[in-house]
Image (cartoon, rainbow, N blue to C red):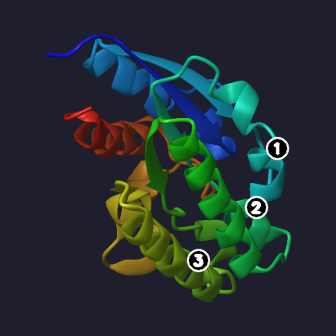
Amino acid sequence: MSEDLLVAALGDSITEGSPGLRGWDVWAAQADPRLQIRNCGSYGQRTDEIAARLDDCVRDADVLIVQGGINDIAQRRDVDTAATYLRAMVRRGRELRLHVALADVLPWNNGWPEAEPKIRRLNALIVGIAGEEGIPLLAFHDTLEDPDRPGRMREEWTHEGDHPNEDGYRRLADVVLRALQNV
């Protein structure tokens, strides 16, 4: 096993974690003792606001995980613009010689069905960014989507329809851990 890794987790409330719950960062660090995770999640932030915090978050980091976009959708912002900010964060991380991974947008039970087409559109753009930039895609959406209710998280993986609960966060941690296996 390789040496310790400082992971800068940059995003919105999905990264920050719900109050009183252990987020994916805690579960991932508990499962892999190499990981020290700096949680730079911030509730309610759009991709432009997240991007403004990147350089502070990644100081001395080895890995950057970028997550965001749902607040752009919730605030009726253009998803193409959100994708532009996500790509810029990925490129900035690579410019800083970090290992970079990009998460897609979770299903949003409380925004369904209105937000669903925008989430699907942004996620398609995110898949494209990951492929074009040659970085791992963290498939958060498909990990928590209920196959019997497309576009929504399984009820047992969310506590209020916006954020994962601890079971949901454990599943997201597994996605992150798989992406970091070879770093």
Foreground pick, 47 / 97: 97
Local crowd at mark 3 within 10 Å, few (<14), some, or many (≥20)? many
Query: Which of the two residues, 51 or 22, is positioned nearer the viewer here?
Result: 51
Q: Residue at x 47, y 54 (%)?
A: 102
Q: Which mark is residue 122?
A: 3
**Which residue was labeled with disc 2?**
71
Q: Quadrant of the N terminus?
A: top left
Q: Nearer the viewer, residue 61 or 69?
A: 61
Nearest to N terminus: mark 1 or mark 3: 1
Instruction: Say whether disc 3 or disc 2 marks the residue closer to the N-terminus.
Output: 2
Amino acid on which the number 2 mark rests in the picture: Asn
Q: Tags 1 and 2 in contact by the CB under 8 Å rule? A: no
> Image height check: is 119 above or below 174?
below
Within-10-Å neighbours for mark 1: few <14, some 14–19, many 20+: few
User: Circle 1 is placed at which residue position?
Assistant: 52
Secondary element type, mark 3: helix
Dots 1, 3 in contact, CB < 8 A = no
Residue 4: % across, % down: 33, 11
- Amino acid beneath label 1: Ala
- Rendered position, 174 above or below 60: below
Q: Residue at x 51, y 37 (%)?
A: 64
- What's the amino acid at mark 3? Leu
